[in-house]
Amino acid sequence: MTFSQFPTDLASVGSYDWPRAPATSSLKEGYRRLREKLRVLDDRNADLLPDDLERLSGSMIPDALWSSLRAYQFERLDKVYLEWARREEGPHTVCAFVMMPSVPRHFLADWAADRGLDLVDAAAVPTGGAALIVPDISSLVRRSLEGRAAMRSYLAELDGASRNVLLGMSSWTWTYLAQTSAIETVVSDARCFAPFGDKALAELLRAHIGDRVLKSADSGKGILAEDDEGAPKDRYLKTLAARAYGCPWAAMRLLDAAVNQEVDANGDATELPEDADHDDTGDDHEDAATWLQDPAVPKLPSRIERIGRFVLHALLIHGPLTAKELGMVLPMTLPVGIGSALERVGLIKIEDGKILVRESAYPHVRRILSEAGLPLDQI
Amino acid sequence: MDTENYDLTKLFNDVSGWTFAQVGAIILLCLLVYHVLRYVVPRVAEKLPARFRLLVLNLIPLARVTLFAVAVVLIIPLVFNVTLKNFILVLGTVGVALGFAIKDWATSAVAGIVAIFERPYRSGDWIRVGDDYGEVIDIHTRSVKLRTADDDVVTIPHSRIWSENIASANDGSKTLMCVAEFMVAPDRQTDGIIDILTDVAHTSPYLDWARPVQVIMKNEIYATRVRLKAYPFELRDQFNFTTDLTMRGRDALINADIRIVATPDFGPEG
C-alpha cells in the first residue's frame, strides 16, 4: 500500500512543524472549554446530530490500520538508521530518536528487535560491533542529585563509545535533558517522526475505513470529502491533526473516541450494506453515517489539580514510575490515593505497580500542562 | 449684575427631577458594569490558560477609566450648557476645587491614570513599594492593593509613583527571578558549589527550564555569600520554589562537606 500524502522522512528535532488548527476552530474550542470550566455548558449535543445515536463501546479503528501505520513508520526508521546501525566501522556517533508519549510504547524496541539490532535497557555501553539501541532512556533520567550525577557519567560514557548508539526517548525527556544537561553536545543528530497533517490522516482513513461515511457533528459534513487541490474540505481533520500534535496514533485514538454510531430499533449499530455505493462527499447514506463528536475532555479534580499537574509532568519526563519513585522526584508530599484519582479521570493507568500516562490521554495531558504554564516538550 | 446672573443661569441646563434620574441611572449603570467586571474578570482569568491570565486581569483598570470617561461624557451635557465660555469657567472652578479640597485624592487619581498607561505595575504583577512586597490584586482609582506573602492586603496610593521607586519583579511577564541564599565558610575550597546548586535548581519541579540558572558568590566579612538564582514557571510558586531551593541546596552543601555558617548575624545583604 502506498501513501502519497504521508511524510516521507523523519523530522529533525527543532524543526518539527506543529500542525495548526484553523483559527476559527481554535477560538470556538477555546470558548467552549471556557464555558465548560465556568460550568455554564452542560449539554454538548450538537444540533446536527440525529437523535438515535450511541457511542461505540468497541474500537472503530481496524487492526489493519495500526499495522499499516506501524509498518510505514518502521520503514521511515529503516531509511535513516538501519544502514548506520549495521555499520561497525567508525566514525562512531550517538543519535537520538525522540518520540511523543502518544507513540505506542516499546515502538523503537520493537523496530530494533524486528531488525535484529542490539538492544540494551541499562545505562551502559557494552562493547560490540554494530549500533546499540537504547529504546527508552526516560527510565534512566531522574530529577534528583544522584540521578543527574548518573546521567553525567552516562553521557561521558556515550561520548567515548566505540560503536554507534541510538538513544530513544520521549519528547519531554529530550527537552528536559537538552535544557539542563550536555546531551546536545554528545548527540550528533536528533530526529523524530514528521507530523501527519489533515491530508495524511484523510489518506490513512480512506485506506482502512473508507467504507464508512464519517461526518463531523460540528459542521454536518463528511470529513473525507476533498476539494480541487486534494485537501479535505471540512476542517475536522485539520483540527484533529492539531489536537493530536501531528502524531497519527494520537489522532486515530481521538477520532475513535469521538465516534457516535446510529442504532437501529433493536439497539444494534447500523452497518453499511456490503455493496453500498458511496462517494466521498458525505452527502449520501444519510441514515448510515458515523458521526464524530468529541467527548468532554478529562479534567483534573479541583482538590488535586495542582499536585496532579506536577505528577503528570514528572511521568512525562521520567516515564513509568512507582509511587515511591514519584515521591523521590517531587519535593512535595503526595496525597494518598492520587494515583487512583488520576486513573479514575482516565489520564493515567497503573501497570505492574508503575504509574504511567495513558497513550490515549496524552493530548489531553499536554493541553492541561500547557494551560497551567508548565514547561512543555519542544521538538 | 444682570449679565452675571444671566451667565450663571446659562451655565446649567434646566435641571429637573428627570435629569437627576438620568444622571443617577448613568452613574448606577457604570458602577454596576464596573463591579460586574471586577467580579467576573478575575474569575474568568483564573480559568484561562496561564499565559492569558495577566493580560485579562489588566482589562479591569482599563475598563474603569473607560467607564468613567463614558459617564462624564454622558452626564456633562445633561447638567451643563456646554460652550467654550462655560467650559473655561467650569474648568477653573474644578481646578480650584481640586487644588484645595481634594488635592491628595486628585493627585492619586491622576497618578492612577498615568499608571494605567505607563504601567509601573499591572494586575497580577509582584511589586515592591517601600517595605511592602506583594501581588497586585486590585487597581482602584486612588490606590493599588497588594497581597503580601503573609496574606496581608496593603493599600498604597498611586501618588507614591511620583516620589518613590516601584520595583516590579516580573514586569508583566509570567515569571520572575527567585534567589536562595547560603552563607558558607570562607576558609574552605569552593569547588563544586556551583555544580551542586545548579543541579539543585535543575531538579526542582517548579523550574522554568527555558530560563538560565546562575550561582553568584560574594565575599562578606565572615562568610562567602552564595546566591542561587533561577526562575519558576509560575509566579505564584515563587515562595515554594525558593523554599525548595533553600532546603535541598542547604542539605546538598552539607552532604558535600561544605560548612554553612550560622552565626554571627551578617546584617543586610550588600
Image: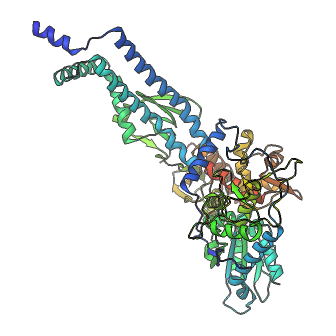
Residue A325 left/right relative to B41: right
Q: Is residue A29 visible?
A: yes
The colour style of the image is: rainbow
In the image, residue A369 lies at what x, y percent? 66, 52
Q: Residue at x 57, y 42 (%)?
A: B265
| Numbered-mark total | 0
The answer to whether residue A187 is visible is no
Residue A119 falls left or right of residue B216:
right
Q: In this view of the protein, which residue sits in the foreground, A39 or A208?
A: A208
Rendering coords of residue A294 (x, y %): 71, 51
Vertical comparison of A269 with A121: above or below: above
Q: Which quarter of the rendering shows the N terminus of chain A?
A: bottom right
| Residue A325 found in image quarter | bottom right
* Residue A251 at x, y percent in the picture: 71, 62
Above or below, B26 relative to A172: above
Query: In the rendered image, which quarter is residue A150 located in?
Result: bottom right
Residue A358 in picture, x, y percent from top left? 78, 57
Q: Nearer the viewer, residue B207 or B80?
A: B80
Work out whether residue A188 or residue B25 is closer to the camera in this orientation and state it: B25
In the image, is A91 to the left or to the right of A140?
left
Residue placed at 16% from the left, 22% from the top? B85
Q: Nearer the viewer, residue B34 or B199?
A: B34
